[in-house]
Image: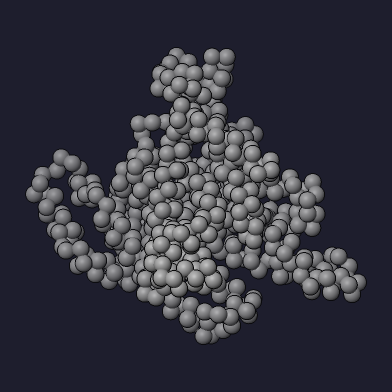
């Protein structure tokens, strides 16, 4: 991949992954250590991103917050892709009543605007990382299902699939061995954009106070920083920048992957 | 056209029913006891049971579902635990603020996105194109709840041009509308650019140029008319994002709309209001999409005469 945007995207995501996995060892300080005397201080040599309203080290909290974003983003995308691709392939392959029922359900779920339902579900279930993941996966699979179904529909008529059918390969084998590998590039592109969406949605829920309460989240840090905008704008600006940078990196990577894997697709953001 | 409109209107019924059914089952299958919320955890068991009976929460689920649907047809989605008023009433009171914010956001988005997208396409790969499209990608990645505080910090706290929040007068609308509009402008400008580029390569544009029309006439009379059709659709599709964005933007600016009501209802566990907000916002979204489809069909006869 030669695109500079893709390299930047990959580099940022690699940093995120490192922070998520090795966060506790990388963080300069304990992200939960209080220092009330120096609350709200700006960046300094000891605390290079400053300290929050309880005097905790902002840099360490940003590193620690990467974990919630990474777990939520990856899990939501994995669940959504696995469920959506399975359902979509089956609907596209078998057609008929199965297809009708599945696609009507997808249409109805797509009739819900964005994260409205996720906010309601996460809100009622109570704030936790598990509930955030559950709430986001309920709607997340529909896009994958639609994509996989469309691909399965068109691939079903192709010669190599007809050939496999004619020598008696069972449906499951054809779907796994012949259809899935051809659907995969489009799924990978969708998953990259899906990761951006899931990380943004997790941050939104955390911003609204519906995210995990026991670990730092970028959205939650941003929300508590808003109260101190006048004296310590860095408390909300820095976590927001972390979210935006991560989402931007996913979008960069998604754009580049699409150009590479799926050149026919229009180069627009969805 | 009449047949097309009729068919689309008929399709509205199963979609609305599906949305209502999903909302009902999602919110009823989730654990949590509204009676405990209303009376508090320490209330006597007998009191809780009495209220549960009065609210019909002890009836079998299908019976509750039937009652819910019958109420919905009459526009009755229950009574708010907190306001002690019909949910529809509470919602209607807050709706104008949200509509005002959404329309202002949309207007800002279009005012920024269309000129930017067109100019970027006309000067493809030029400096403006590169800067604008990079800006658009950043804008599409920046969450509302980050852009909002930046604008507040800059224009309300530092420069003092606009109020920090609330809804009093036109000045208070500027920052929330800008927050909402910038994100959408980012997506729409990319779409406008792509659509103009595609139209520029059409045969009729070559013909128009070949017969010696000035570039300005080609652009405004031939290209834009065709290029903006898909943009209209995207505006419709983005309306859902706009409504979700409005929920969060309202929260940032304490804007007294449906979004703020929704979040307050979740925090106070006011289930009827949560359910009502999800229902009404989803219905609004479905209706807007229908309006966009019809508008699209009116502009482009291929849609209504084509397959389906």
Return the residue found at the far bottom. B3
Image quadrant in which the N terminus of chain B is located: bottom right
**Figure disc tally:** 0
Location of residue A99 by image quarter: bottom left
Q: Residue at x 56, y 44 (%)?
A: A250
Location of residue B274 by image quarter: bottom left
Q: Residue at x 59, y 62 (%)?
A: B234
Return the residue found at the far right. B212
x%, y% of residue B231?
Answer: 64, 63
x%, y% of residue A114?
Answer: 47, 55
Residue B284, visible in the rendered structure: no
x%, y% of residue A269?
Answer: 60, 54
Q: Is residue A54 above or below residue A177?
A: above
Residue A75, visible in the rendered structure: yes
Q: Nearer the viewer, residue B280 or B240?
A: B240
Q: Is residue B196 left or right of residue B284?
A: right
Q: Nearer the viewer, residue A85 or A15?
A: A85
Q: Is residue B81 left or right of residue A138?
A: left
Q: Nearer the viewer, residue B108 or B232?
A: B232
x%, y% of residue B287?
Answer: 48, 69
Check the image and tell me how it is coloured. one colour
Q: Is residue B6 above or below residue A15?
A: below
Q: Is residue A116 above or below residue B232?
A: above
Q: Residue at x 59, y 77 (%)?
A: B303
Q: Residue at x 56, y 19 (%)?
A: A48
Return the residue found at the far front. A167
Q: Is residue B17 left or right of residue B291?
A: left
């Amino acid at each position: 991949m030669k695109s500079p945007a893709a390299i930047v995207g990959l580099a940022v995501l690699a940093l995120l992954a490192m922070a998520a996995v090795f966060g506790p060892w990388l963080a300069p300080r304990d992200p939960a250590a209080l220092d009330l005397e120096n609350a709200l201080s700006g960046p300094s040599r000891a605390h290079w991103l400053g300290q929050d309203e309880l005097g905790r080290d902002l840099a360490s909290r940003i590193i620690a917050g990467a974990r919630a974003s990474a777990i939520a983003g990856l899990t939501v995308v994995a669940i959504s892709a696995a469920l959506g691709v399975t359902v979509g392939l089956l609907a596209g392959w078998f057609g008929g009543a199965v297809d009708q029922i599945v696609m009507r359900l997808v249409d109805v779920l797509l009739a819900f605007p964005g994260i409205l339902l996720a906010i309601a579900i996460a809100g009622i279930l109570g704030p936790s990382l598990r509930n955030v993941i559950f709430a986001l996966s309920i709607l997340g699979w529909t896009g994958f299902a639609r994509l996989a179904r469309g691909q399965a529909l068109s691939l079903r008529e192709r010669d190599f699939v007809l050939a496999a059918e004619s020598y008696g390969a069972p449906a499951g084998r054809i779907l796994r061995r012949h259809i899935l590998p051809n659907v995969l590039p489009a799924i990978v592109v969708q998953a990259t954009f899906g990761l951006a969406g899931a990380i943004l949605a997790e941050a939104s829920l955390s911003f609204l106070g519906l995210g995990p309460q026991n670990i730092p989240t970028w959205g939650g840090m941003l929300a508590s920083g808003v109260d101190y905008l006048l004296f310590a704008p860095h408390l909300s600006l820095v976590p927001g920048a972390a979210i935006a940078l991560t989402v931007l990196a996913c979008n960069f990577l998604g754009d580049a992957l699409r150009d590479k894997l799926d050149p026919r697709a229009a180069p627009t953001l969805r | 056209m009449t047949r097309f409109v009729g068919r689309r209107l008929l399709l509205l019924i199963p979609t609305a029913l599906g949305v209502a059914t999903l909302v009902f089952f999602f919110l009823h299958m989730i654990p949590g006891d509204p009676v405990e919320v209303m009376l508090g955890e320490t209330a006597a068991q007998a009191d809780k049971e009495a209220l549960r009976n009065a609210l019909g929460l002890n009836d079998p689920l299908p019976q509750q579902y039937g009652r819910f649907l019958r109420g919905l047809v009459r526009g009755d989605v229950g009574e708010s635990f907190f306001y002690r008023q019909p949910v529809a009433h509470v919602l209607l009171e807050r709706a104008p603020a949200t509509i005002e914010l959404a329309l202002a956001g949309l207007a800002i988005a279009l005012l920024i996105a269309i000129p930017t997208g067109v100019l970027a396409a006309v000067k493809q790969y030029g400096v403006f194109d590169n800067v604008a499209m990079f800006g658009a990608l950043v804008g599409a990645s920046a969450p509302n709840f980050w852009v909002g505080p930046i604008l507040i910090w800059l224009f309300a706290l530092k420069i003092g041009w606009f109020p920090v929040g609330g809804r009093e007068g036109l000045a208070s609308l500027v920052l929330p509308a800008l927050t909402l509009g910038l994100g959408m402008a980012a997506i729409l400008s990319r779409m406008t650019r792509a659509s103009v580029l595609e139209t520029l390569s059409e045969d009729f544009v070559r013909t128009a140029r070949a017969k010696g029309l000035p570039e300005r006439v080609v652009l405004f009379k031939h290209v834009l008319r065709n290029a903006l059709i898909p943009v209209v659709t995207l505006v419709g599709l983005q309306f859902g994002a706009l409504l979700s964005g409005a929920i969060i933007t309202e929260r940032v600016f304490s804007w007294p709309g449906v979004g703020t009501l929704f979040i307050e209802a979740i925090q106070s566990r006011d289930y009827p209001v949560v359910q009502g907000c999800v229902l009404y916002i989803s219905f609004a979204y479905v209706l807007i999409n229908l309006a966009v489809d019809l508008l699209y069909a009116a502009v482009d006869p291929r849609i209504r005469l084509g397959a389906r």
